[in-house]
Image (tube, rainbow, N blue to C red):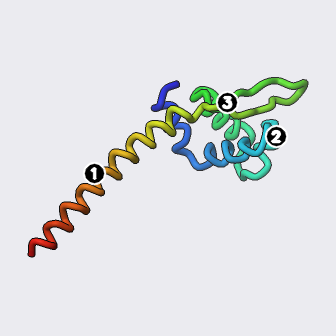
Amino acid sequence: MNLDHTFAALADPTRRAILARLALGDATVGELCEPFEISGPAISRHLKVLEEAALITREREGQHRRCRLVPGAMAQAAEWIREHQRFWNASLDRLAEHLKKKDEEK
């Protein structure tokens, strides 16, 4: 999985809303279109981005295409975020301790 593709896909609020909907369960493309005031082709373009980022899969079921989340697809992105969160938390903790010592020296 490519983090650039993942974060690019997550950058759009419509795509994040689609992922949130799919977190509740599989849905057809038509069902995913319902809450949005954009065209079906626009939703399909969003789905293509999500699919290319390996966040969802689309499978044909008769006349419909069913979408589902790829289990664990965001694990690499979540780990990247956790790593950076640990780094910045530790850095800010050290800064706070340094500033506290400076204040006490006054």
Q: Residue 101, labelled with which disc?
A: none
Count of labels shown? 3
Q: Residue at left 76%, top 45%?
A: 24
Element type where label 1 sits in the image: helix
Q: Residue 30, labelled with which disc?
A: 2
Given residues 57 and 37, the one toward you in this image is: 57
Mark in front: 1 vs 3? 1
61 over 26 or under it: above or below: above
The disc, 1 or 2, on the residue closer to the chain's N-terminal end is: 2
* Image x and y of residue 53, in percent: 57, 29
Element type where label 3 sits in the image: loop
* Image x and y of residue 36, in percent: 72, 51
Q: Could you tell me the amino acid type at mark 3?
A: Val
77 over 20 or under it: above or below: above
Mark in front: 3 vs 2? 3
Q: Circle 3 is placed at which residue position?
A: 70
User: In which quadrant is the C terminus drawn?
Assistant: bottom left
Crowd around label 2: few <14 · some 14–19 · many ≥20 (10 Å): some
- Evaluate if marks 1 and 3 touch, with contact meaning CB atoms under 8 Å apart: no
The disc, 1 or 3, on the residue closer to the chain's N-terminal end is: 3
Q: Circle 1 is placed at which residue position?
A: 91
* Image x and y of residue 75, in percent: 55, 34
The answer to whether 20 appears left or right of 35 in the picture is left
Element type where label 2 sits in the image: helix
Mark in front: 1 vs 2? 1
The disc, 3 or 2, on the residue closer to the chain's N-terminal end is: 2
